[in-house]
Amino acid sequence: MEARFSADRTLGRLVKWLRILGYDTALRRRDRDRDFLTEAAEEGRIALTRKRDLARLPYQGRLVVVRADRSGEQLGEVLEALNLNPDPAKRMSRCLLCNALLEEVPKEAVNGLVPAYVHERCAQFRRCPLCGKLFWPGTHPQRIEEYLRTRIPRRHA
């Protein structure tokens, strides 16, 4: 079964990178720690936090207390702690805002919705079924791959 995460508000940037890797990652912004842990357990998610005192609360699921300050180091720390090997085929398959799985959209359907030069140069487009945001493979995938190469522990790349 694929790892699913629930991160508290202390890990917003890490959430983005886990979604880029294709992991189902919910961001919880509530203040109450018990609510955060309860929701994560009910949904069968691995709870992620930087709050060390959460480890002292009773929790029925898996909890990872992230120690690193920067998101790149946090990403490596979580992958290492859980011995995860991200599937490269799942990269950039989730909406970075909503966490929903992106859907392929025909090029003709985005005509007028994206800049003309993007429509001319790109062949593939994806849309978030929840928020409607459009995604296409501009220069971001190359920069993302370079970033991940330097942050993911070698055996997890």
Image (cartoon, grey):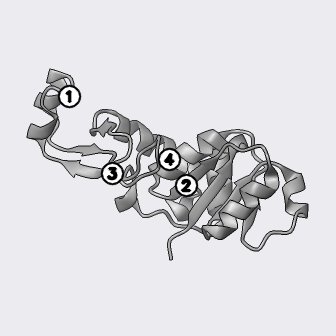
Amino acid of disc 1:
Leu
Residue at image point 34% right, 61% down = 89
Residue at image point 80% right, 69% down = 59
For disc 3, the marked residue is 102
Alpha carbons under labels 1 and 4: distance apart: 30 Å
Question: Considering the numbered disc 2 on the image, is that residue within a helix, a strand or a loop?
Answer: strand
Q: Where is residue 105 in the image (x, y as percent from the top left)?
A: 19, 47
For disc 4, the marked residue is 148
Marked residue nearer the N-terminal end (1 or 3): 3
For disc 2, the marked residue is 25
- Relative to 63, 18 lies left or right: left
Residue at image point 43% right, 41% down = 144
Marked residue nearer the N-terminal end (4 or 2): 2
Marked residue nearer the N-terminal end (1 or 4): 1
The reply to whether the C-beta atoms of the residues labelled 1 and 4 are less than 8 Å apart is no
Q: Residue furthest bottom?
A: 1
For disc 1, the marked residue is 113
Question: In this orientation, does residue 52 appear?
Answer: yes
Q: In this view, does 3 lie above or below 125?
A: below
Question: Considering the numbered disc 4 on the image, is that residue within a helix, a strand or a loop?
Answer: helix
Q: Within the image, what quadrant is residue 6 found in?
A: bottom right
Name the front one of labels 4 and 3.
Answer: 3
Q: Is residue 115 above or below residue 92?
A: above
Q: Within the image, what quadrant is residue 101 found in?
A: bottom left
Alpha carbons under labels 1 and 3: distance apart: 17 Å
